[in-house]
Image (tube, rainbow, N blue to C red):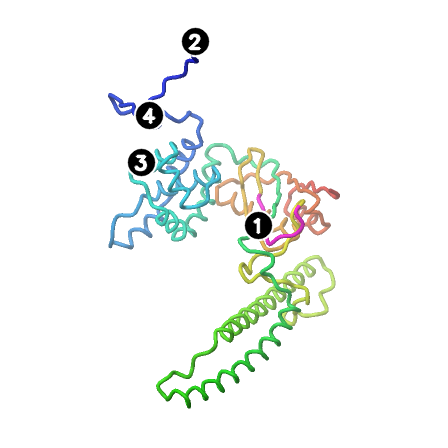
Amino acid sequence: MSKSYREWCPDRIFLFPPSPQDWLPEDDLFYFLLDTVAALDLSAFFAHDERETRGQPPFHPRMMITLLLYSYATGTRSSRKIMRRCQADVACRIIVGDDIPGFRSISDFRKTHLPRLETLFVHVPKLCSLAGLTKVGTIALDGTKVKANASRHKAMSYERMDTEEKRLTEEVTKLSAEAESADTAEDAAHGPDRRGDELPEELKRRQTRLAKIQQAKALLGERARTEAAEEAARRAAQGRMLPAVAPADAVPESKDQINFTDPESRIMKVSNKGWDQCGNAQAVANESQIILAADVTDQTNDQRQVVPMMDQTRANLDTAGVTQAIGAALFDAGYFSAANAMALESRGIEGYIATAA
């Protein structure tokens, strides 16, 4: 006797159209996001769209936001892949219906409304507060290195930039002289109709690289002055001796690096993977695992993140109307310093910071 199988009929015709939502379990993330987005204040999105009266009507902001949140939360970042999910994924198809947005529309919506999408984070604690999920009690701060969209091999140290700048300047000067000599000879040979101001491709590349190096050196100098000013402010707050060099006179260390592809990223140590070009992502969550504050910094050391993240948490809670004080805060050893312990105490926060890994 042959094996029996469940009935399968991809060409099935329904006598009455079913509700697509019946195909999803009741606890699917889709329903939570649908209710959450419905409660968000999207007036800024509508105000932006209403300024433009030309062209075809745009996709509804609530639909696009729900689609983006669902896709990002389930691991899909690419706009092209999101569009394909709208064609084949049940939840995404329920969100968009028959009017499937193209990948360019999805990408443009994110780019156009990026500042407004970021402000939605402030609304989340408000909703959680109404749902009773923002009872502060004990919170925890942790961070992770997020790989930047840049290769660490595109980074260059300040010392090497200085050497390369001098070398390239000499080469540009030499090539300029060669170009002028060649153009003069060709003008004499071919007549005055030929343009004589073209530069060799090799010279263009060197000039472009020289401009990038000079810009990167300026950014490193600005970064050094900013960090020196922050260090001076920390020392002053702690009653310690100020640095010998004034912040305005600070210069980069010879080994300081900057990445040409993503100047905001840094070379950071990554767990079990050595070093890579990264950003340092930070998040604060409460006992209900609600994220109360989040940020991405280019600082490799977590110690400097305690004060700004605690202050951001308090500000977000105040915005959400949560007046309850932060009780205790948990940190791993990467956040330990005497200054951080004092800062937590001055804010009335009972800090539990590991002193060793």
Mark 2 and mark 3: span between their CA atoms? Answer: 44 Å
Residue kind at label 2, given as amino acid type = Met
- Residue at numbered disc 2: 1
Disc number placed over residue 147 in the picture, else none: 1
Residue at image location 60% in from the left, 38% down from the top: 139
Mark 4 and mark 2: span between their CA atoms? Answer: 25 Å
Residue 187 in percent (x, y) is at 41, 88
Q: Looking at the image, is mark 1 or mark 2 earlier in the sequence?
A: 2
Q: How busy is the neighbourhood of tag 2: few (under 14 within 10 Å), some, or many (20 plus)?
A: few
Looking at the rendered image, the disc whose residue lies closer to the viewer, 2 or 3, is 2
Give the answer, above or below, for where 234 lies relative to 160.
above
- Residue at numbered disc 3: 97
Instruction: Identify the magenta region.
Output: 273-283
Total tally of numbered discs in the picture: 4
Residue kind at label 3, given as amino acid type = Gly
| Quadrant (top left/top right/bottom left/bottom right) for the N terminus | top left
**Could you say whether the residue bearing mark 1 is in a helix, strand or loop?**
strand
